[in-house]
Image (cartoon, grey):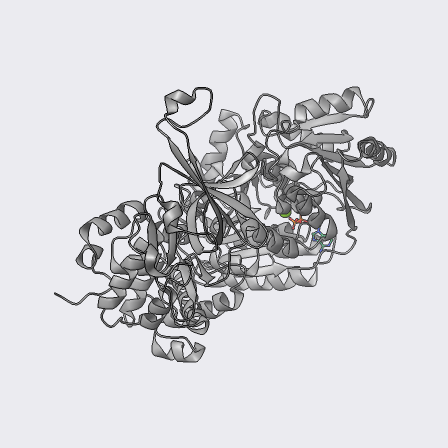
Amino acid sequence: MDKIDLTSTLDRVIGGRTAAKLSERLELRTVGDLLRHYPRKYDQRGKLTDLAELIVGERATVWAKVESIEERELGHPRARAGTRTKRGVSHITNIVIADSHRKLTCTFFNQRHWSKQLRPGADAMFSGKVSLFNGKLQMSSPSVAILSDGRGDGRGDGAKGAPDIEVIESFPGGVIPVYPLVEGVTQALVQRSIRSVLDVLGDVVDPVPDVLLAEHGLVDFGTALHDIHRPRTEDHLAAAQRRLRYDEALAVQLVLARRRADARNYPAEPCPRIDGGLLDEFDRNLPFALTVGQQLVGEIIATDLATIHPMNRLLQGEVGSGKTVVALRAMLQVLDSGRQAVMLAPTEVLAGQHARSLRDVLGPLGRGGELGAPPEATTITLLTGSLSTAARRKALLAIASGQPGIAVGTHALLSEGVFFGNLGLIVVDEQHRFGVEQRHALRTRHPEGNPPHVLVMTATPIPRTVAMTVYGDLDTSILSELPKGRSPISTTVVPAADKPTWLDRVWKRVREEVGKGHQSYVVCPKIGDDDGEIPDDGSDLESGEDGSAGRRPPLSVTAVAQMLRDGPLVGLRLGVLHGRLPSGEKDEVMRAFAAGDIDVLVATTVIEVGVDVPNASMMVIMDAERFGMSQLHQLRGRVGRGSAPGVCLLVTEAHENASGRARLDAVAKTNDGFALAEADLELRREGDVLGTSQAGRATSLRQLSMLRDKEVIAQAREDAQGLVGDDPEMSQWPGLAEMVSAVISAESQDYLDKG
Ligand code: ADP
Ligand code: MG
């Protein structure tokens, strides 16, 4: 037999039938696949699982003590008319198992042997789906396993060979690996297969260079693979986990480092700062002084733009930190070099607002082609669905001609085959609303010329680990300070169910704000009453998250606007804004609100990002528990933009101890977007961070945690940079390329690739 290595197929080592089953049920085909099927958790012999942690509806594996075994003879099913028995069931065994506090009933049908094989007092492992029956935790026909040394079962080896009891190995350290299972694959089967594989596996070539292992004090790959499955002691297990975690972090970072290296190898048109151009003129007329952060980031971007390789930069800055000015100055520098710039916004509302405010701040400089504009003036073209066909054709021709100028639009600009003759810079605002595909499309928008520089802006603070992975191919800058003159925002949770009179207070407060000459937003989770749970504008509305299934449908803009108009806010000027209005109307509403002609704007999350109306001082969010924390933070960032202090009221019917309430309290407690982003991350499933596949399968990162492993990720990033350095193909380290594809599924790699 040839040597067995990680690439050998499993049928060479374990029986063909078992191999087929592992392949079919768990997609494990090679020795490497199986060895990367790590235990989901480790139990300690003698330690019972906390039954309180079980989740109804999910599969679980628990160690528990058998408390009692009760059998019931049902007789012939037909003879027992009136009782709800399953067809053909004539005998039921209920095994009640327990931890030190709670009980759970395991039910078996027509299996008369249990009372002979297990006895009260025995410890055993039960795997199955947890359900709730008459208010009690239950598992129906779980698989049962005991330890091979018999110490757990209370009756020595007698249980071995029993038809329905599996025997799993116990290791000297008393650590028992528990594998993620699917229907039809048992713990014992996985464990046995892994042992067979480890027994015949030859030396494993370590893909990671020795110097790095030595530097970080990591065990070699073969040892790690052994100890992750058959840990000799807790310490050996910890060392194995540390090594495999590092490998995963390194694999991700290698993909990203190669991407960065790749991007750097493309040529770009350098757009150096030019004296006496639009940028200089703009800076001279700026009505305020740039913050130190804006100046610094501005310098960095100016330098990026002047180089012969494309800039790929992520600019993070709190809501209101003044990112637009930074972007505009970058665009002007590019225009000064005779090239085009485009700014993409996530919604038409925002695109319209950007075009307006660019025209405002540029003044005469933005009125190219108009009578009386200075000769150096540039043009600002807004491209949205509301343009007339003729206007649109004219705009598209201008863009295609390569005539320098700024185009503003939604990402539709990318999908509609718009051709830029001379594109120098793409600015993507509020990037978190753009899908992966669109981001990819951005970078490939250079059919003939060199790829443009790209500046991505986001106001959703991104936790550092996520920034280093999901956005790891971008250089990052942060605007941390807010411009002077910002007003504080105070946030309060309004428990409408516990204290109904508070809601009346909310509308009184809105009236008071209006009385003082200010304006308010009222945000609702959906548009109308007939459109189910579909959130407006692709927002990541979280519905039913707090487990209160079956409650009333979310409040809608139309219903709430009607209620306010006829009731508490009668006589005030109300406006309505949502994604389903014709774009002309959306624009009109936004313009009226900005001009102060609307007192209260009832809207969906279309106003979540970027909308800037300094006179608005109050934000009321209805059914607030239905929004994500970052979303709430974004929404409240719409107020406190002028001289009046901002007030944000989170109205909710979620009760005090519902999980949704905890998130609202967290939002109310801090204004620090980064802290909230971290908290948000903690509440998400790990898999959502890197993106899950279409099939809903989590990513293949199994050991690495975005929450816990910040240092490892940072370390791996540095190492990857070094390894890829002058050798982007990694030809010196063939094993690494293999490791990357083994660790990261093609799909996730693609995801990172499109970054
Ligand atoms: P965001 O980072 O959320 O996109 P904006 O770019 O919309 O923030 O800026 C918010 C507001 O602050 C705008 O009205 C803008 O004109 C103003 N602003 C930006 N920079 C400064 C500054 N240095 N001093 C005073 N106001 C500023
Ligand atoms: Mg903005």
Place residue 326 in its image quadrant: bottom right
Place residue 347 in its image quadrant: top right
* In this rendering, position of residue 387 left or right of residue 18: right
Residue at 79% x, 35% y is: 519
Name the quarter where the N terminus is drawn: bottom left
Residue 181 visible in the snapshot: no
Residue at 35% x, 44% y is: 113
Q: Position of residue 599 (x, y in %)?
A: 78, 30
* In this rendering, position of residue 9 left or right of residue 593: left
* In this rendering, position of residue 625 left or right of residue 77: right
Q: Position of residue 687 (x, y in %)?
A: 47, 50
Judging depth in this view, the residue of 558 and 88 nearest the camera is 88
Q: Position of residue 706 (x, y in %)?
A: 51, 59
Residue 704 visible in the snapshot: yes
Residue at 77% x, 35% y is: 498
Number of marks present in the image shown: 0
Judging depth in this view, the residue of 290 and 11 nearest the camera is 11
Q: Position of residue 234 (x, y in %)?
A: 45, 71
Residue ranking furthest to the left: 1
